[in-house]
Structures are given as structure tokens and as C-alpha cells.
Image (cartoon, grey):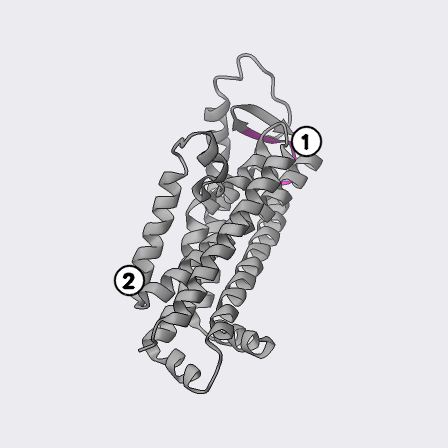
């Protein structure tokens, strides 16, 4: 398995698409930073305009913590979109090129082969999220400094700098779990549909549907356990009262969904003929 994982990472970082994905991450980050630099003050004034008659705000509310929070909101669509394109290509591209057939003809275990795909995709997702977290934090604090974080969830919540950093760190960890879920789904979709164009369409459709379905109220039980209602766990770090139990429960449920989807993909790969 260790040897298989090594070659999966070797192939992944030999692909040009991997580096295009990294560049796309940096472009999203740079776009948010530039927008915050030139338009952030105006946007913040609009958001707080109804409150400025009743409250006095001191200090610079446009700071690195707010910019990082804005970048975190790319976890809804932009970041998972890039991830599903990159990770699904780990399988669909090899189906298209016939690489998988060649490898399996050499007596490689189907289960070990596809399990290595999932593990390497999960580790790659973890690596990208660490890169996003470090680069976002470093650049945001360098250009915007530190200060209180102001967000609106049910009410206006203001977190001092130390507390803001802890909550942002927790949100990145929970967000990584959400991205691993999308990675697991993209690999499984690649196993089912195989052809790259079809895989990208279905993976993109899956992402859109998850975002739309996550906004629906399904009732108490389904809201607690349905997978589309676990995607937003990272946002729970920005409610004033930090509900650690709910965060742990939702994160654990989402991780189990990721493993279940991977298990389904592995079983399908083991049973289907590779043409």
C-alpha cells in the first residue's frame, strides 16, 4: 500500500492540472484580498450602516481576521469545485488513457489500487487546505493587521483577536472535513461515470445540488443527520455561543458519510469490469 500511495502522489504532482489547481486557489485568494483592500471599507460601512446610529465602533474592523473569514466563504463553492475537478481526474483520466487496465493486468489488487486513490486524494485535500490556511493567514495579517472579528449569525457577533484566531483555526479544520467529503464523492463519481467530461458535469451538478439542498428545512431529525446539513459545520465556529457538542457531532457524521461514499466506490470498482 505504501508503494501504491507513493506512485499515486508521484502521478498527481506530475500532472499539469494539479499546478493549475494550485494557481486557481491562489487566484481566488488574491482576488478576495485585492477586493478587500479597495472595496472592503465601503462594504463594511454598508453592512453596519443601520447599527452605527445605535452603537459606536472603535478600531479598524476591516482587518486580517475579517478578510480570512471572507476567504473561508469560498468553501461553499469555489474551493470544492476546484478540488472535485482535480481529484476526479485521478481516476477518470486513467480510465480514458487506459492506464488502469495496464496496472490491473500486472496483478495489482483492485481494492488496494482504488483505496490508494481515495487516501492520496484525502491527503492531497488536506495539503491544499493547510496551504490555503497558512497563506491566507500570513497575507491577511501582513496587509490588514489583526483586530476584532465582526460577523452576523442570528445577531451581530464580535470576537476579540485571540478568540477570533481560535475560531478561524477551528473553522479551517471543520472546512477541511467538508472538502474531504466532496473529494470522496468526486472519486466515486469518477468510478461510476469514467469519462472525464461526464464526471465533471455530474460532480459539478452534485456540488450545486448539495449547496441548494443544504438550505432546506427537513425537520428536526433530518436536519440533525442528513449529509447536506453537515456541510456547513465550519460556520458554527462563528456563533457567539460555541456549541462544541454540535460541531463534533456534525463533523463526525460528515466523516462517516465520506467513508461510506468511499466504501461504495471501492465496492463498485471491485465488481465492475475495466474496459
Kindly report which numbered mark, 2 or 1, lies closer to the viewer in this rendering: 2
- Nearest the viewer among 238 and 62 is 238
Q: Which residue is mark 1?
A: 160
Magenta residues (range): 144-151
For the point 52% across and 17% down, the residue is 51
Element marked by disc 2: helix
For the point 43% across and 69% down, the residue is 90
Q: Residues within 10 Å of mark 2 (few under 14, many from 20)?
A: some
**Left or right, 37 with reference to 95:** right
Magenta-drawn stretch contains 110: no
266 vs 130: above or below = below
For the point 42% across and 49% down, the residue is 78
Q: Residues within 10 Å of mark 1 (few under 14, many from 20)?
A: few
In the rendered image, which quarter contains the C terminus?
Answer: bottom left
Picture coordinates of residue 81, whole percent (x, y): 40, 53
Label 2 vs 1, first from the N-terminus: 1
Magenta-drawn stretch contains 149: yes
Taking the image as drawn, is residue 23 in sight?
Answer: no
Picture coordinates of residue 179, whole percent (x, y): 50, 52
Picture coordinates of residue 252, whole percent (x, y): 58, 46
Amino acid at each position: 500500500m505504501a508503494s501504491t500511495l507513493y506512485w499515486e502522489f508521484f502521478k498527481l504532482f506530475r500532472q499539469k492540472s494539479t499546478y493549475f489547481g494550485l494557481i486557481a486557489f491562489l487566484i481566488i485568494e488574491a482576488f478576495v484580498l485585492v477586493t478587500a483592500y479597495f472595496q472592503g471599507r465601503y462594504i463594511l460601512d454598508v453592512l453596519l450602516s443601520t447599527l452605527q446610529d445605535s452603537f459606536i465602533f472603535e478600531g479598524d474592523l476591516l482587518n486580517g481576521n475579517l478578510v480570512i473569514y471572507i476567504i473561508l466563504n469560498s468553501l461553499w463553492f469555489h474551493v470544492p469545485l476546484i478540488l472535485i475537478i482535480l481529484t476526479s481526474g485521478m481516476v477518470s483520466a486513467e480510465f480514458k488513457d487506459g492506464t488502469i487496465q495496464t496496472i490491473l493486468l500486472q496483478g495489482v489488487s483492485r481494492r488496494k489500487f482504488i483505496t490508494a486513490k481515495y487516501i492520496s486524494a484525502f491527503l492531497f485535500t488536506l495539503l491544499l487546505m493547510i496551504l490555503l490556511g497558512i497563506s491566507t493567514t500570513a497575507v491577511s495579517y501582513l496587509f490588514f493587521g489583526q483586530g476584532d472579528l465582526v460577523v452576523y449569525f442570528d445577531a451581530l457577533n464580535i470576537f476579540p483577536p485571540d478568540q477570533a484566531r481560535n475560531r478561524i483555526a477551528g473553522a479551517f479544520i471543520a472546512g477541511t472535513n467538508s472538502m474531504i467529503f466532496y473529494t470522496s464523492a468526486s472519486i466515486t463519481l469518477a468510478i461510476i461515470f469514467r469519462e472525464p467530461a461526464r464526471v465533471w458535469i455530474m460532480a459539478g451538478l452534485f456540488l450545486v445540488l448539495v449547496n441548494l439542498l443544504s438550505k432546506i428545512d427537513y425537520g428536526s431529525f433530518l436536519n440533525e443527520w442528513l449529509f447536506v446539513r453537515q456541510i456547513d459545520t465550519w460556520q458554527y465556529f462563528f456563533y457567539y455561543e460555541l456549541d462544541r457538542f454540535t460541531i463534533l457531532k456534525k463533523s463526525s457524521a460528515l466523516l462517516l458519510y465520506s467513508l461510506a461514499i468511499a466504501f461504495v466506490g471501492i465496492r463498485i470498482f471491485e465488481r465492475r469490469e475495466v474496459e
